[in-house]
Amino acid sequence: MYLKCNRRFKDGKEHRYWSLVESRRCADGRVVQRPVLYLGEINDSQREAWIRSIEAFDEEAHCQRRLTLFPADRELPVDRADAVRVRLSEFELRRPRQWGACWLFCELWEQLGLREFWSERLGVSREGTDWEHVLQVLTAYRLIDPGSEWRLHRQWYEHSAMGDLLGEGAGVAQKDTLYRCLDQLLKHKRALFDHLTRRWRDLFGVRFEVLLYDLTSTYFGAPGQAWRFQRVRFPHRQGVQPPHR
């Protein structure tokens, strides 16, 4: 990976926009660049109107500090005590995680009132496992990138921001913990259906006489392919309606 600079001249001024990109080789031998992280414009002007600041956490003072970033090849303004030079050539990306989809899911979880619903029914184990957090991770995984519990344990959780958003470590994604959590859900099926029905009615003001829903998962592990998943295909005869998936 490396830093890529895009220059743009606007109103007689030069603006530099930075991105972190990686090179990937295609099957036909071509090399393409995939943007990994967009950094935006790094300040290179000493005029106050062009200066943009960021919030940084000071580990020694345990508080937030506002810093103004400048490229290392530019002079710092003398009147800016919060100015910091950034060595873009030494920039490193460590443990990137999917954040946006996970954050949106957590907001949806709160809007549906599922945190209170499951906290009352699942509670916390004697070992300190918060079952509501485990279930939240499982549900987010099913919604964002469905697959097996084994894949969640070995791959997905580490590359998601669910641990950061829930304040949890890797313990909530242990395979045995995931399966034990699923075992506790069946007895709450009717209560969950009633709860979601009320929330749907309250949020959208809908009315109905018959409500049909399907909780069937259509993703299964393909034989011999531990990390790949394929949609299930059902064979059917001519003139016969295939089963719902």
Image: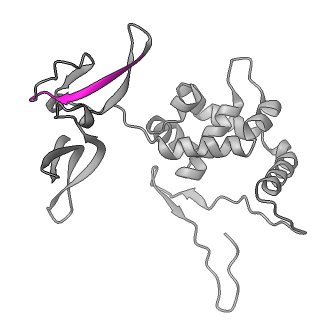
Answer with the quarter of the image where residue 43 lies: top left
Residue visible at 40% across and 7% down in the picture: 61
Residue visible at 47% across and 40% down in the picture: 99
| Residue projecting furthest to the bottom | 239
The image shows residue 200 at horizontal and vertical percentages of 78, 55
The image shows residue 179 at horizontal and vertical percentages of 67, 38
Q: Quadrant of the C terminus?
A: bottom right
Q: Nearer the viewer, residue 43 or 148?
A: 43
Q: Nearer the viewer, residue 162 or 172?
A: 162
Label tally: 0
- Please tell me whether residue 147 is drawn above or below residue 43 in the rendered image: below
Specify start and end residues of the magenta stretch as a single range: 64-73
Q: Is residue 43 in the magenta section?
A: no
Residue visible at 27% across and 26% down in the picture: 68
The image shows residue 183 at horizontal and vertical percentages of 75, 39
Q: Is residue 67 left or right of residue 18?
A: right
- Please tell me whether residue 231 is drawn above or below residue 174 in the rendered image: below
Residue visible at 81% across and 45% down in the picture: 186
